[in-house]
Image (cartoon, grey):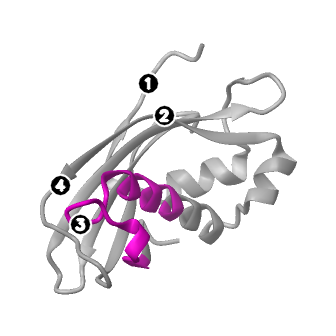
């Protein structure tokens, strides 16, 4: 699998704020959908995650806005794994929003973890998912070593 996964979105009327721009919460929603596209491309559908007894939880997200995005524009979200713990339990994705003309519109960075759905505690992912995350790690991927609670 490539180190980047892309997902495109056409900006709809209900995606806008009062100023006619893509609203701030939609950036986070597009990024979340792009992460799901990464998982599916890696062979891990939501059903597969449920069968494995794990779920993804966001620990924090930040958005850096660079250019306006307006209605009917198509934005492509380029997603990369830019941080990963040794066991794969913690991850950081970077999502770059690119307008149709090639300009970067925003960057969303999301820090998250896997949880065991039965115990509601952080956990390492199954080996196949860990391999997918490791294999997709960007060249500049940082090692995340946060203590598991």
The picture places residue 83, in percent across and down from the top left corner, at 39, 42
Can you see residue 118? yes
Element at badge 3?
A: loop
| Residue displayed at 78% across by 33% down | 117
Earlier along the polypeptide chain: callout 2 or callout 4?
Answer: 4
Of mark 1 and mark 4, the one earlier in the sequence is 4
Upstream in sequence: badge 3 or badge 1: 3
Q: In front: mark 3 or mark 1?
A: 3
Which type of secondary structure does the marked residue at label 1 adopt? loop
The first of marks 3 and 4 along the sequence is 3
Q: Which residue is mark 1?
A: 145
Q: Which residues are magenta?
A: 8-34
Residue 29 within the segment the image draws in magenta: yes
Q: Residue at x 62, y 47 (%)?
A: 130
In the rendered image, residue 3 lying in the magenta stretch gets the answer no
Q: Quadrant of residue 89?
A: top right
Query: Quarter of the image containing the C terminus?
Result: top right
Q: Residue 1: x and y, percent? A: 53, 71
Q: Is residue 103 left or right of residue 115?
A: left
Q: CA distance from mark 3 to mark 4?
A: 11 Å
- The reply to whether callout 1 and callout 4 are in contact (CB within 8 Å) is no
Task: Name the disc covering residue 113, or none.
Answer: none
- Labels 2, 4: front one: 4
| Measured Cα–Cα span from mark 3 to mark 1 | 37 Å
Q: Which residue is mark 2?
A: 85
Q: Which mark is residue 65?
A: 4
Question: In the image shown, does 138 or 148 lie closer to the viewer?
Answer: 148
């Amino acid at each position: 699998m490539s180190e980047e996964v892309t997902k495109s979105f056409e900006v709809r009327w209900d995606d806008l704020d009062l100023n006619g721009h893509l609203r701030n919460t939609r950036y986070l929603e597009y990024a979340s959908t792009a992460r799901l596209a990464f998982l599916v491309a890696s062979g891990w559908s939501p059903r597969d995650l449920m069968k494995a007894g794990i779920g993804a939880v966001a620990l924090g997200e930040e958005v850096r806005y660079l250019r306006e995005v307006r209605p009917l524009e198509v934005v492509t979200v380029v997603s990369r794994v830019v941080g990963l713990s040794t066991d794969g339990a913690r991850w950081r994705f970077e999502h770059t929003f690119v307008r149709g003309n090639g300009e970067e519109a925003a960057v969303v960075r999301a820090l998250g973890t896997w949880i065991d759905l039965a115990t509601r505690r952080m956990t390492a992912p199954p080996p196949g998912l860990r391999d997918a995350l490791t294999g997709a790690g960007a060249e500049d991927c940082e090692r995340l070593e946060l203590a598991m609670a």
